[in-house]
Image (cartoon, grey):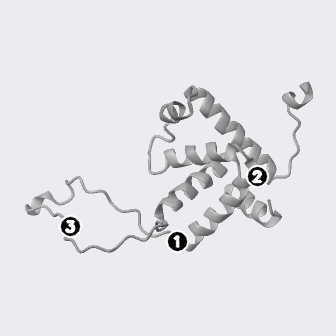
Amino acid sequence: MRSDVAAVLRKKSGDVTGLMGLVFEAATTERKLPGVIKKRYKVMWPDYPHEWSAYGYTEADAPLGAATADEVSNYDRVLEALVDLGEDAALVWAVAHSASRRARGPAWARLGRVMHLHPQTVKRRFERAMLELWFKINDINVVSDVDDAR
């Protein structure tokens, strides 16, 4: 990881919890970006309620809107930092996408079913991966007990 990327992530996040927030924000930013496959534009009129008092009480979802330049810059930095995680990058990205636009946080049970693991195992591996990323950003070398056993 480049030192300038690590410095910016270190400054913007502040701590491990802030770093998780940046990763979750990057997943939301990815959903705001346009799709890879260009779709044809179709002409259609949106459905609207016929009752004037029904506004605000419909099932319509609000669109995400466009991503800002700062969000895209943070997205690029987070993706560059996640490359250093190796196999854990896919886990971190899956957790971030499951937490995107969800008030209750990541869907640990759903992720566990997809990965054929217990939800607590998924959560523990995610937390370990985030701590590992935090240590890499801060250039802290920590030798774990597992490495000592080898």
Question: Which structural element holds mark 1?
Answer: loop
Within 10 Å of disc 1 (Cα), the crowding (few <14, some 14-19, many 20+) is few
Q: Residue at x 72, y 54 (%)?
A: 83
Q: Earlier in the sequence, mark 3 or mark 2?
A: 3
Find disc 1 in the rendering and name its residue.
68
Q: Quadrant of the N terminus?
A: bottom right
Find disc 2 in the rendering and name its residue.
84
Q: Is residue 67 left or right of residue 59?
A: right
Q: Is residue 92 left or right of residue 81?
A: left
At which x and y percent is residue 118? 57, 25
Q: Residue at x 49, y 50 (%)?
A: 100
What is the tally of numbered marks visible in this picture? 3
Question: Which structural element holds mark 3?
Answer: loop
Badge 3 vs badge 2, beta-carbon distance below 8 Å: no
The circle drawn on residue 26 is: none
The circle drawn on residue 46 is: 3
Instruction: Name the front one of labels 1 and 3.
Output: 3
Q: Quadrant of the C terminus?
A: top right
- Residue placed most toward the observer, 82 or 55: 82
At which x and y percent is residue 29? 52, 61
